[in-house]
Image (spheres, rainbow, N blue to C red):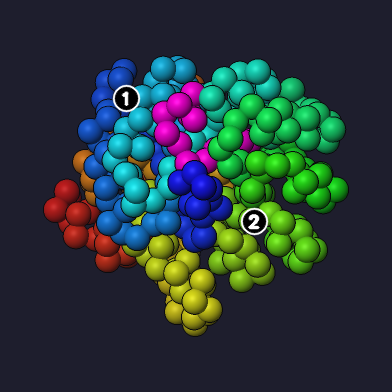
Amino acid sequence: MPEHRRRIPVQGLISDLVTPFSGEAVDHAALAALIDWQIASGVSGIAVCGRLGEGPALGREERRAVLATAVRSAGLAVPVLAAVGTYATDATVRLALDAEEEGADGLVVTTPYYSKPTQKGIIAHLSAVAEATALPILALADPATTRSDVTAETLWALSEIVGIHGFVDASGDMARIAVIDRRLRERLALYSAHDATAFAFNVLGGSGTLSPAANLAPRLTSAMHQALRTRNIDLALDLKDRLTPLFAALGDTPDPAVVKHGLSPVLGLSETVRLPLVPASSAMGASVRRALAGLPECAAQLARAS
């Protein structure tokens, strides 16, 4: 059995990583340092080149290089997921094949944005990607940013496609998982991509979280998910409460610029983002810094930087 078949679906916390830049170029040394910190902090997996990783602003060869750094840095410690979703099926397939060549363990494929496909179109899009690659796929719906979502009927259809192993919900809508049939949860691993509601999502049967906040607080977010997996709900709830100010500061749709602002004093990463993104506002930056100051894994670094 191929290695990735044993590692996907991931159980627990998957860090949805930012892409560090140095000037106009990807900072591969900083990316490797970020991944090392994540793994040492206990994350269950990492994902690169997604919306938070500014994937749409990366060229095809840059994406390959980012993934190569991630695969090399992670080794066999944790699985590496490559986000490859675009608004065009043929472009998504090309990125999926690139990811397979670079050694990814699995793919995150967002429902197509901008073109606003029908449910039939979404199914056909994901089916085409699954047919083109042997890598396990996690389908992702982020209606706030893509204006594209999936219905319960579409989830059932996706569960019947060989190669689609999970579904990632970035909506934060607890009604979705609350009404999902147990039989569907047995066919598809379900993940949240909304930190503020991830605790409840996982209590209701989720397999884990694709987490933006894990960039900044990997140890605590990992500990919360480990507590959930062992059904230590009291501990998980305590950890969630400690993380809530950070979740609130990041908002429902975390901005890569805000995450990088928070990482700058913690790991020394550049705050550079690519247009059309711009640096974090002083108000947003201050909110994230205050939240991080209350977390033990970040407070010491912030104190040294101040």
Q: Does residue 252 appear to the left or right of 256 in the view shown?
A: right
Q: Residues within 10 Å of mark 1 (few under 14, many from 20)?
A: some
- Please tell me the numbered disc located at residue 26: 1
The region drawn magenta spans 98-110
Q: Does residue 287 appear to the left or right of 252 in the view shown?
A: left
Q: Position of residue 32 (x, y in %)?
A: 27, 39
Residue 280 visible in the picture: no
Magenta segment: does it hold 102? yes
Most extreme residue toward the front, as rendered? 1
Magenta segment: does it hold 35? no
Where disc 2 sits, the SS reads: strand
* Identity, as a three-letter code, of the amino acid under mark 1: Val
Where disc 1 sits, the SS reads: strand
For image coordinates 24% across by 42% down, the residue present is 33
The quarter holding residue 164 reads top right
Give the labeled residue for mark 2: 190
Residue 43 visible in the picture: yes
Q: Position of residue 89 (x, y in %)?
A: 68, 22
For image coordinates 70% across by 42% down, the residue present is 162
Q: Looking at the picture, does residue 5 appear above or below residue 173? A: above
